[in-house]
Image (cartoon, grey):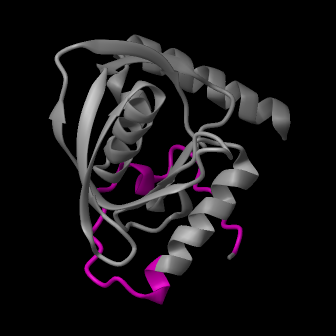
Amino acid sequence: MALRDIVAYPNARLRAKTAPVTVFDAEVGTLAEDLLETLRAAQGLGITGPHIGVLSRVMVIELSPEDGPRTYLNPEIIWSSPETVREQEGSLSMPGVLDTLERPAKVRVRYQTLTGEVLEEEAAGLLSVCLQHEIDQLDGIFWIFRLSSLKRDRLVKRYEKLKRLST
């Protein structure tokens, strides 16, 4: 396992669509391990290939140490509920800023495991929000682009100010 550098906003890789995983070998296993180590070091809940500059459709979510990590390859949302929830979201690539987004309350996701097995999972609550957030990232939709332009502009200014203050 290796700790990887996290790509910072506004890097163009954060808005790029990812390529599907087609080979389920030790290399993709190492990528998943690196994502997990980087996620834990950053104290986040979810991370994708683009967060570390790898445009591959891989993501890892760990909501708590008790739940353990979940690795998803080639995930896609195949159903979402009409009911919605509002949750605060942020990104490892844009630390220090959060805003509230509205998303479906429940989703069903089809994905592959590290061995290529195809599975489906239904999720609600925080897991549902994290799955949607990270799948957006894999689709080239950085979370702030789900905000209104006014909210997004304010958030970017706050982030830029935080970056200036930390240097």
Does the magenta segment cover residue 17?
yes
In the rendered view, does 120 fall on the left or right side of 142? left
Q: For this rendering, which residue is in front, 78 or 21?
A: 78
Q: For this rendering, which residue is in front, 72 or 135?
A: 72
* Coordinates of residue 48 in the picture (x, y in percent): 47, 56
* Coordinates of residue 81 in the picture (x, y in percent): 19, 23
Q: Residue at x 58, y 22 (%)?
A: 98
In the rendered view, does 6 fall on the left or right side of 119? right
Q: Classify residue 162 by image quadrant.
A: top right
| Residue furthest front as drawn | 66
* Coordinates of residue 69 in the picture (x, y in percent): 56, 54
Look at the magenta stretch and give its main secondary structure. loop
Does the magenta segment cover residue 95?
no
| Residue furthest bottom as drawn | 26
Position of the C terminus by quadrant: top right
Position of the N terminus by quadrant: bottom right
Q: Residue at x 58, y 45 (%)?
A: 67
In the rendered view, does 78 fall on the left or right side of 121? left
Q: Residue at x 34, y 53 (%)?
A: 138
Residue 5 visible in this rendered orientation of the protein = no
* Coordinates of residue 107 in the picture (x, y in percent): 26, 33
Q: Residue at x 68, y 63 (%)?
A: 37
Q: Which residues are magenta?
A: 2-28
Q: Classify residue 90 by image quadrant.
A: top right
